[in-house]
Amino acid sequence: MSGRFLQRLRNPAKCGAMRRSGGALIAVALWLAASGHAETVPEPSPRIEKVSTCALRADPATYNHKLIEVRGVVSHGFENFTLSDSRCEHASGVWLEYGGRVNSETEYCCGVKTPRAAALVVEGITTALTEDAMFRRFDAQVRTRGDVRFRAHLIGRFFAGIKQNTPKGEFWGGYGHFGCCSLLMIQQVVSVDADGGK
């Protein structure tokens, strides 16, 4: 026999007390659950890092896979859906696309415009999109025929892409038109300034 079993045989009163206290604890737990007093710990909100468009373009690797908040000029048209800032000197571009199940349907080589049956997964990360009134305002601008430019405040998941060395210097790419750019998967549109495309 084990020592624990022998101890129970030697002290049956203690064993009975333990059974009674265990039953009391179970009863309290059931009462808390039934009465709604049991508290669940909420999952922490993902950390969002604020960054300027110029900082993002100058050092894409620092923000790779991060959820970021950024302001800049959105340009959309044939073979173009990008985020920029006229003050930036670095050449690395930022391509835009919607997260979740919504496709921007931007025409470029070599993008996929087919409807998404599920949320888009990029580099093993499932993307999301808040489809609220502000997003619909943003999307209406994007789907305007011809070239459009406007300022926007965005939250999204950033993917740096692949570091490439060319005769013109170093840049990051792999996404967008002919792999021109890093990628920002738009998760939420915070604000849109339709007249601020400068």
Image (tube, grey):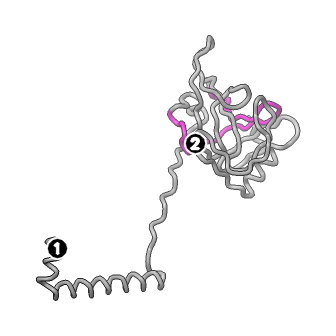
Q: Amino acid at mark 2?
A: Gly
40 relative to 89, above or below: below
Q: Helix, strand or loop at disc 2?
A: loop
Q: Residue at x 72, y 48 (%)?
A: 192
Magenta range is 62-88
Is residue 101 left or right of 41 when viewed as pictured? right
Between 179 and 184, the one nearer to me in the picture: 179
Q: Which residue is mark 1?
A: 4
| Distance between the alpha carbons at the discs numbered 1 and 2 | 49 Å
Q: Nearer the viewer, mark 1 or mark 2?
A: 1
75 relative to 18, above or below: above
Where's residue 47, x and y in %? 50, 50
- The picture quadrant where one finds residue 67 is top right
Is residue 181 left or right of 61 when viewed as pictured? right
- Label 2: how many residues lie within 10 Å, few (<14), some (14-19) or many (20+)? few
Q: Amino acid at mark 1?
A: Arg
Q: Residue at x 75, y 57 (%)?
A: 133
